Image: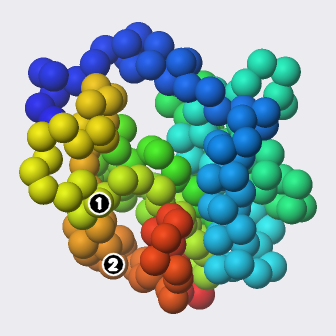
Amino acid sequence: MPAARHPTDAEERARYLRHQNSLGCAGYVERAEAVALALCAARPGARTALDFGCGPRADGEARPVLAALLARRGLSVAACDRFFAPWPALGAAAFDLVAAVEVVEHFRRPLHEAEALFRLVAPGGVLAVGTAFLETAGQPLDGWWYLEDPTHLTIWSRAALLRLARAHGLEPPDQPADGPLLLARGA
């Protein structure tokens, strides 16, 4: 989407605050649990995880949902979000598991931000990307619900994201067709 049509930071943040992402929301927890399970199964023995673009914590909750679910599995978990969890100075930090669920469609500078995301995956690590890929839209695109959200600035095809990931040393391991796209970095 052209930068002139991007929402302001205040508009984008306000939109995210309307989301109902809490441990009390069974449907959301179920989706987050599926991501946590897929990541942990793809990288047994993982010790560190990053919830990239974690979103806001619900009132009274110590962590965003996916970060909490990963921490329950004994992982050391960091969470970062442009609006809700100060971006740590990640620099050369790398994690065994990285989750980017409902995040990549919000990238304002998609190539730059995707490359930064890929660098966060440690050797032997796994990245889970959850988004509605263009291939799921069907034809025509008019009326596709995913385009109705004004904060969805970048719509990815699975092939384009895979091509970019491969250029940065990530490959998809064997994985179920449903669920997040998993990308692994060789050891």
Give the structural element (helix, strand or loop) at label 2. helix
The answer to which of 118 and 30 lies nearer the viewer is 30
**133 lies above or below 38:** above
Q: Where is 87 relative to 135, above or below?
A: above
Quarter of the image for the C terminus: give it.
Answer: bottom right
Label 1 to label 2: alpha-carbon separation: 22 Å
**Left or right of 164, for residue 73:** right
Question: Residue 179: image x %, image y %?
Answer: 52, 66
At label 1, counting other C-alpha atoms closer than 10 Å, the crowd grade (few under 14, some 14-19, many 20 or more) is: few
- Residue drawn 52% across the image and 52% down it: 100
Q: Position of residue 79 (x, y in %)?
A: 67, 42
**Which residue is labeled 1 in the image?**
136
- Residue 93 quadrant: bottom right
Tell me the residue that label 2 is attached to: 166
Q: Mark 1 belongs to which amino acid? A: Thr
In percent of the image, x 36 and y 53: which residue is there? 132
Q: Is residue 119 left or right of residue 154?
A: right
Mark 1, secondary structure of its residue: helix
Is residue 134 visible to us here?
Answer: no
Q: Position of residue 140 (x, y in %)?
A: 10, 51
Q: Please provide percent x and percent y for residue 130.
A: 47, 56
Image-quadrant location for residue 40: bottom right
* Residue at image point 80% right, 79% down: 45
